[in-house]
Amino acid sequence: MFIQVALNLPVEELFTYRVTGRESHKPEVGKRAIVPFGPSNRLQTGIIVSVSTSPPEGNFEIKEVFDIPDPYPLFTETLFRLAEFVSRRYCSSLGEALFRFLPGAFIVEEKVRVSPLKPQKPLTPKEEELHTLISSFSSPVSVSFLRRKFGGSSLNAYLKRLVEKGAARLNTQLKPGGPPKEKWVRYLKEGKCGPKGRELLNLLKKHGELPLKHLTYFGFSRGVIENLRQKGLIQITEKESLLPPPPPSLSPRGTTELTQEQKAVLESLFKYRGIHLLSGVTCSGKMEVYLHAARRAVDSGNSVLILVPELLLTPELQSRIESLFGTNYALYHGGLTPAQRASVWLKALKGEVPLIVGTRIAVALPMKNLGLIVLDEEQDPSYKEQQKPYYHARTVAVKRSELEKVPLLLVSATPSVESYYRAKRGEFLFHFLPSRVTRIPPPKVELVDLKKERKRVGIFSEKLLSALERAVNSGGQALLFINRRGYSHKIICPNCGYTLNCKKCGVPVTYHKEKKCFICHLCGTRYKLIFRCIKCGQRLEFTGYGTERVTQELKLLYPNWKIERFDLDTVKTYKDANRLIKLAVEGKIDVIVGTSIAVKGHNLPNLTFLGILIADQLTGPPDYMGAERAYQAIVQAIGRVGRFKPGYAVVQAFNPDFYPIKYAVTGQFHTFYEEELSYRKLFNYPPYTLGAVIEVEVPETQKSKLKELYAAMKKLPSQEVSKPLPLPNGKTYSIFIKLKSDTLLPKIKQLLSRFKVTYKIDVEPIKIP
């Protein structure tokens, strides 16, 4: 018997292996296969793609499978088809797609260590140097450590010579993959034993089986347990240790009765098993709709997958879920350990949990009897993966809905332009909730022109600070929104114009006063703090505002107020978010200064004032998506205020007539999307085309190759190609392509491979370099 295996490698081909019958389990599509690979036959984890009784055509060596460790497949047939779609759409291999979703704990690792021996033949000086290094350790040393100490490129050759000359021995250790295992003790039969053994037997007879750690906790020694095992009265087995339910959230909220508009959406969701887009004004009860839909699906015996942008921002969602499901659900996100993710994967596969809430990596969880997929805040850029394959979870969820024929509900008060366009065309069923579920009217919003309005101090206008003071002095709570972290984001020399940029990325660094350093917000690199220009020696100017500077200036203005910062510097974990939100809910914070994570999905009952300090900044990078980003950020922020008490908002801008700012402030939902679509159509931007960014690395000596590549790309049909633009690192060039469909992507990939350049293809990018 023969199997074809997909490995986690950037190659299109599958690899054939012979099944000997000595493996732990029979081969089956979707199971793991541990196989030798390459000249060194180092063991790799692969996924079985096909099983055959006859060998493939061709004259090549077929190696034997080392083991098939799983009793059941980890991937269903549907997930295989989904992974094939991801590999085609996002220009990766099938193996890369499968292993992007599979938890790392399932990957078996082979670690090689080296032990010194007495040389049997004379060594060269370099071989002697390596032998001395290995001998300096009291235990076998890892090859990876030697590679760092001795040099990577030549190490393998020298190790091979040492082994041939009898001067070293290679020891291979296999680290099994999978979720953590736990020992359980099972009752078998009665027998002679002491009083403590009798007590243990009676306990096991009552329960049938208990975890070993529970028995030792209750006072049964290992000696007593081992004695009963040797007599054949009990049996000790290993089981997968599945992840316990999530810890309780903030106080669970009770369920609410749906309005007639909400009920209409709910009924439509189960009549039409396609893709739905649910939008509406903020506070219109969109979350209640999909949670009631989830409850109905689970009551019908199906499972539900809810995707959210960032799990550390969902204590409100968790509280609502607990009111409907108790703790009978699981969380799945990047903050879990690999073993914990493997545990949730198996729970989903076996149908042991009806509801899973996760981030983008959960989009391919093997849910048993899947009945509903929900994508909350579907416009959020967090759904875009930043490692190969660079998939977009929204697109993958749409494909999964089509493959499994289950309804997908996309939810957003400010949907992506792409989703709005597809709903307009009839590809998605569009629902809009026009009214708030509470009797509180929408907040009054005032737009302030920073070019004309008098500023009391710094970036704070007189109108903004007056409204802020009224809100706090009357017992309310305020949120000031500025979408920049740190203290200052412009460090410039006033004499020679030198700006402080990241050496790796070429973008300006940000001054973090509390951390006493400069940080690149693109790659995270930190730089030592300097105050004088490295070119002319003049004192540098620190301009621009971030959350840190806003907080400091507010504390100087209002020393008696309780002011907290809510950004990625202060909120790193789910626990951090819960703590700050709990303080805000309890009224122990007067003013929150935050970035975008402060305006997503929170219900703060005391929040009566919002100040957006610089609305123009919300466009982000200068690309065609800037207006969309600004509109969404402003509407989302305004939606946080006045949910339980009448609210007021001040939006400051240097260009208040810019259409996304104007329409967001005045609540003109359809007007914004129609105008934005008209601009996109005029310049043939997505959603009228499929966008892709290609980054090509070309050395200075091969610039002619870049010109040839660009000319070859322009000859491909049904697309537009921008001229290559140099990126800040000086050796990488960015090319933006507008495609009529994704069918052209394989040809582009082949073209890049033919020119033998290092490249990256990012389909559906969220920003253009």
Image: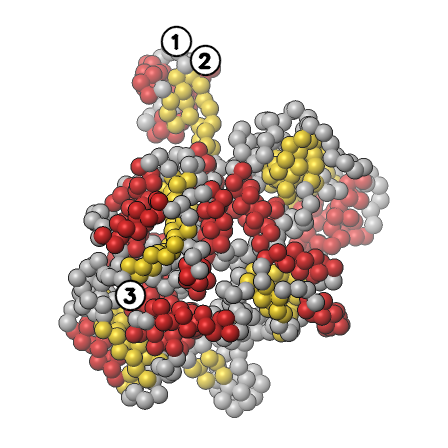
Read off the residue under disc 1: 191
Who comes first in sequence, dot 1 or dot 2? Answer: 1
For residue 646, side relative to residue 321 (left or right) = left
Q: Going from the N terminus, do you reach mark 3 or mark 1 first?
A: 1
Three-letter code, disc 2:
Gly
Q: Mark 2 highlights which residue?
A: 232
Q: Between 530 and 338, which is closer to the camera in this rendering? A: 338
* Extreme-right residue of the structure: 122
Instruction: Tell whether label 2 touches label 1 (CB within 8 Å).
Output: yes
Q: What residue is rendered at 30% in x and 41% in y? A: 296
Residue identified by numbered label 3: 639
Nearer to me, 651 or 114: 651
Q: What amino acid type is highlighted by mark number 3?
A: Gly
Q: Is residue 84 visible?
A: yes
Task: Using the numbered discs, state the Cα–Cα distance from disc 3 to disc 1 in whole angstroms.
Answer: 69 Å
Q: Is residue 139 visible?
A: no
Using the image, determine if residue 432 lies above or below residue 622. above
Q: Estimate how packed mark 3 is, as few (under 14), some (14 to 19) or many (20 or more) residues with alpha carbons within 10 Å.
A: many
Tell me what residue is drawn at x 55 percent, y 89 percent: 496
Q: Which mark is residue 478?
A: none
Compared across the picture, whether 684 is left or right of 326 comes to right
Residue type beneath disc 1: Gly
